[in-house]
Image (cartoon, helix red, strand yellow):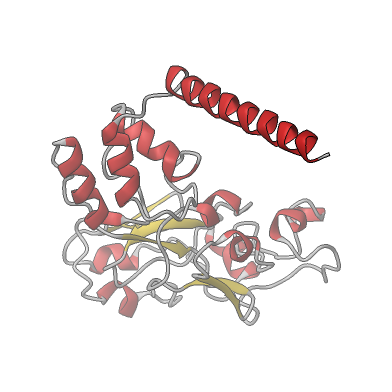
Amino acid sequence: MITGIIAAATVVGIVGILIGFFLGISGEKFKVEVDPKEEAVLGVLPGNNCGGCGYPGCSGLAKAIANGEAPVNQCPVGGEPVAKKIGGIMGVDAGSGAKMVACVICGGDCEKGKTNYEYTGVEDCVAAATAPAGGPKACKYGCLGFGSCVKVCPFDAIHIVFGIAKVDKEKCKACSKCIAVCPRNMIELVPYDSKYAVSCRSTEKGKAVMDNCSVGCIGCGICAKNCPKGAIMVENNIAHIDYEKCEGCGICAEKCPRKIIM
C-alpha cells in the first residue's frame, strides 16, 4: 500500500518536472519579442484605456508610437507632460500643444430651447434622435439632453444640467468619447484656456432660429464687426471663433444681441 503511494507520487513528480521543462523550452522558443521602447512608452501612458487616442487601449497606442505609426502626443489624457516623456523615449520633439477640453455647442436649455412634443421613449440621445423629427427638440441642431455623452465619459466630466449637457473642464481629458456618441454632432474640442464659445451651431436663418430658441445665433455679424482682433466670423449663418486670434476680451459676448457667446 505504502509502496504504491510512493510510486504514484514519484510518477506525478517526474511528470511535473517534465511538463515544467517542456513549458520552459516552449516559452523561450515561441517567445514574442517586445520592443523595449514599446514597453517604456506603455509605462508612461496613464493607463485609462479610454480609446480617445483612436487605438485599442494604451497598449495599442504604445505599439503604434514605437512603430512610428502614431505621434508621441497622441494621448489626449496624458497631454503635454506625457507627450514630453514619450518624446524623450522616442528621441523626438513632442512639441507644445494647447490643452483641449470638450465643449457643448448649445445654449438652448429647458427654458430657452423649444420642444415640438413630449418624448416618452428611451432616455438616450441616440435613441431619441430616431424619433419623429429627429427628437422632441424644435431645433434640429440642439442638445437633446438625454445623456448619451454622460454615459460614455470615463472621467465623470459631463452632466445634464437643466436639459443640456455641460462639461466640467477641470475633469475633462479630451478623450473625445462624448463627441463620437453625440447624434447631433454638437460637441467639439476647444482650448482649455478659451474664455468664450458660441454656444450654438444652427445654420438656420434668423427667423427659423428665433422660432426654435430664444438664444440661438441668428448670424447677424455684430460680434464680427466689433471684434478688435478679427477673431470671430460668420459663415453659413453661424458665428465661429478663431481661438488662435482670440484674446478673450469679451467684446463679442457683450455686443451679441442673443447673448449666445459665453
Of residues 40 and 141, the one nearer the viewer is 40
Residue shown at the point (63%, 73%) measured from the top left: 113
**Quick check: 10 left or right of 118?**
left
Name the spot of residue 153 as percent of width and height, x first. Answer: 55, 62
* Corner quadrant of residue 147: bottom right
> How many numbered discs?
0
User: On screen, 217 above or below 41?
Assistant: below
Q: Residue at x 69, y 67 (%)?
A: 146
Q: Is residue 172 above or below residue 66?
A: below
| Residue in view at x 36 percent, y 52 percent | 76
Give percent across and percent down for residue 26.
50, 20
Residue 170 locus on image (x, y percent): 37, 73
The quarter of the rendered structure image containing the N terminus is top right
**Residue 203 visible in this rendered orientation of the protein:** no
Q: Quick check: can you spot residue 92?
A: yes
| Residue 50 percent coordinates (x, y) | 49, 52
Q: Would you say 92 lies left or right of 162 here? A: left
Q: Is residue 211 above or below residue 50?
A: below
Q: Is residue 167 left or right of residue 78?
A: right
Q: From the viewer's perspective, is 194 left or right of 163? A: left
Quarter containing the C terminus = bottom left
Return the residue nearer the eye: 60 or 18: 18
Question: Which of the pair 240/55 is nearer the observer?
Answer: 55
